[in-house]
């Protein structure tokens, strides 16, 4: 299990999850291809996080990226920065600036076993 995380990413978790759902469960090559052509803001940090996890796999466990798949990609709520916007007649409205915690887990692909047919005599 290879883990990489990105904490306090300054985008709402709802927007990041839409990109994460496209990548979850895919092979690493397919996930990198998907993220490189996606036109969402969250695709770039997720691409960097995936590259970091691949580097962790190569450096720590000597596993090449061809044998990896995205097992888990979790986007959790981070700290919420609360701000105020001035309005008419001395009022103000609250603005919540949301952040995300992203956790990526890679796992080696399961090896497919081929069944050998036994010949009848």
Image (cartoon, rainbow, N blue to C red):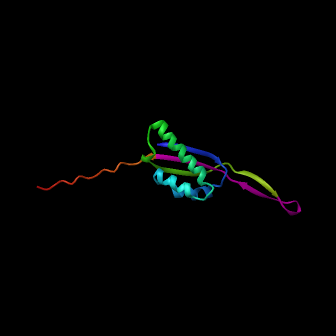
Number of dots carrying numbers: 0
Kindly identify the residue that appears in the image at 54 percent across and 45 percent down.
51
Indicate the position of residue 90 as horizontal and vertical percent values: 88, 59
| Vertical side of 62 occupied by 22: above or below | below
Q: Residue furthest left?
A: 121
Kindly identify the residue that appears in the image at 53 percent across and 57 percent down.
21
Indicate the position of residue 81 as horizontal and vertical percent values: 72, 50
Q: Residue furthest bottom?
A: 88
Indicate the position of residue 33 as horizontal and vertical percent values: 51, 54
Kindly identify the residue that appears in the image at 52 percent across and 56 percent down.
34
Magenta segment's dominant SS is strand
The front one of 22 and 62 is 62
Indicate the position of residue 88 as horizontal and vertical percent values: 86, 63
The part of the chain drawn in magenta is: 86-106
Kindly identify the residue that appears in the image at 48 percent across and 36 percent down.
60
Decide whether residue 103 is among the magenta residues.
Answer: yes
Relative to 62, is 111 on the left or the right?
A: left
Placement of the C terminus among the 4 image quadrants: bottom left
Relative to 27, is 13 on the left or the right?
A: right
Relative to 85, is 117 on the left or the right?
A: left
Decide whether residue 11 is among the magenta residues.
Answer: no
């Amino acid at each position: 299990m290879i883990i990489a995380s990105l904490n306090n990413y300054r985008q709402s978790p709802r927007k990041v999850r839409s990109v994460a759902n496209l990548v979850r469960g895919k092979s690493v090559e397919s996930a990198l291809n998907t993220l490189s052509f996606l036109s969402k803001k969250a695709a770039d940090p997720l691409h960097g996080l995936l590259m970091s996890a691949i580097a962790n796999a190569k450096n720590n466990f000597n596993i090449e990226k061809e044998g990896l798949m995205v097992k888990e990609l979790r986007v959790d709520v981070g700290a919420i920065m609360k701000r105020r916007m001035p309005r008419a007649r001395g009022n103000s409205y609250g603005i919540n600036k949301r952040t995300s915690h992203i956790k990526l887990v890679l796992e080696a692909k399961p090896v497919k076993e081929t069944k050998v047919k036994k010949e009848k005599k």
